Image (spheres, rainbow, N blue to C red):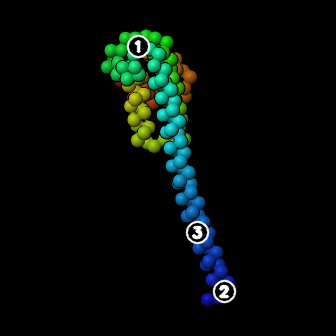
Amino acid sequence: MSIERIINVIGILGVIGSLIFVGLQMEQSQKIALAAQQQSRTEVLVDIIGGFDEGDSSFVEYISGIVDGTYSEDTTTVRDATWQIWMLYENDFLQYKLGLMDPKVWEAKLSSMLTIYNACKYKDITDLALRFSTAELSEILIKSSENRCP
């Protein structure tokens, strides 16, 4: 084998090694982006939950009541939290579409969205919030909905 061939083989192996390294770096960057997006979503939700510190009920009571239809309090905090949750859900949908959310996390988010979407208590806020979101998200919710509200 000539020296030129040896140099070419070494060069090709170097390029292949570089491509493998770049691929691994991209995979690591994707994981870091996913973790950062999850952290951002968590911070927003913690802020929403913190808004309930001023009222007589807790966020857990609110969510439980929404799920079983027994929540009766109608305060500005509750209405604002419902609006904020829908804005967070729209952001979740866009992050999922961009590949920044794990599909299993998206499935859990969609299930949560449908719970609130199917709750009649704050349907006025839900309908208004969805007018400001992407049409595709509204379509997904409508198709998957039980639509029990009058």
Can residue 135 be seen at all in this image of the molecule?
Answer: no
Q: Check the picture and name the quadrant holding the C terminus.
A: top left
Could you tell me the amino acid type at mark 2? Ile
Comparing 139 with 21, the one in front is 21
N-terminal of the pair, mark 1 or mark 3, is 3
Give the secondary structure at mark 3. helix
Cα–Cα gap, marks 1 and 2? 82 Å
N-terminal of the pair, mark 1 or mark 2, is 2
Q: Which mark is residue 38?
A: none
Left or right, 126 with respect to 62, comes to: right
Could you tell me the amino acid type at mark 3? Ile
* Percent coordinates x, y for residue 133 in the rendering: 54, 26
The label nearer to you, 1 versus 2, is 1
* Percent coordinates x, y for residue 37 in the rendering: 53, 39
- The answer to whether the residues at label 3 and label 2 have Cβ atoms under 8 Å apart is no
Q: Which residue is mark 2?
A: 3
- Label 3 Cα crowd, 10 Å radius (few <14 / some 14-19 / many 20+): few
Can residue 103 be seen at all in this image of the molecule?
Answer: yes
The residue positioned 49% from the left and 39% from the top of the image is 38
The residue positioned 36% from the left and 20% from the top of the image is 61
Comparing 81 with 117, the one in front is 81
Q: Which residue is mark 3?
A: 16
Q: Which residue is mark 1?
A: 56
